[in-house]
Image: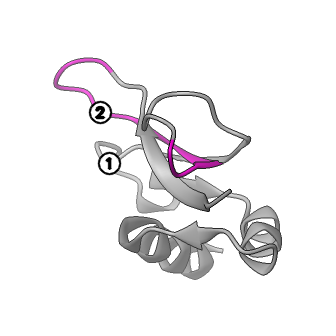
Amino acid sequence: MAVVIRLSRVGTKHAPKYRVTVADSRRYVTGKYLEVLGTYNPLLKDESKRVVLDLAKTQAWIKKGAQPTDRVKHLMKLAAQSK
């Protein structure tokens, strides 16, 4: 099973919000997932609240072999800088 860490959109039209999820790569993007690691709300003005991500859980999944997408890698850097 190929496991990926990716974004899944949960917001409404013209108000995007995303969950950072761990899922099987063969599943649909907004389908069943294994775990939610955090959230991303690109419309928030406050940059410290824009990305909420549990970095310890994320690193644990990466050690288990999960592959983060490019966007998730960028969000991990932003979350690390805001702490």
Mark seen at residue 42: 1
The foreground one among 53 and 31 is 31
The foreground one among 18 and 51 is 18
Q: Residue at x 62, y 61 (%)?
A: 2
Q: Residue at x 77, y 67 (%)?
A: 61
The foreground one among 28 and 45 is 28
Residues drawn in magenta: 12-26
Residue sitting at the far front = 1
What secondary structure is found at the residue carrying circle 2? Answer: loop
Q: Quadrant of the C terminus?
A: bottom right
Query: Along the polypeptide, which appears first: circle 2 or circle 1?
Result: 2
Residue sitting at the far top = 12
Task: Give the image location of residue 69, x and y in percent.
Answer: 44, 68
The amino acid type of the residue labelled 2 equals Pro
Task: Give the image location of residue 51, x and y in percent.
Answer: 51, 56
The amino acid type of the residue labelled 1 equals Pro
Q: Quadrant of residue 81?
A: bottom right
Mark seen at residue 16: 2
Task: Give the image location of residue 39, x and y in percent.
Answer: 55, 45
- Indicate yes or no whether the magenta region holds residue 72: no
What secondary structure is found at the residue carrying circle 1? Answer: loop
Q: How many residues crowd around disc 1 within 10 Å: few (fewer than 14), some, or many (20 or more)? A: some
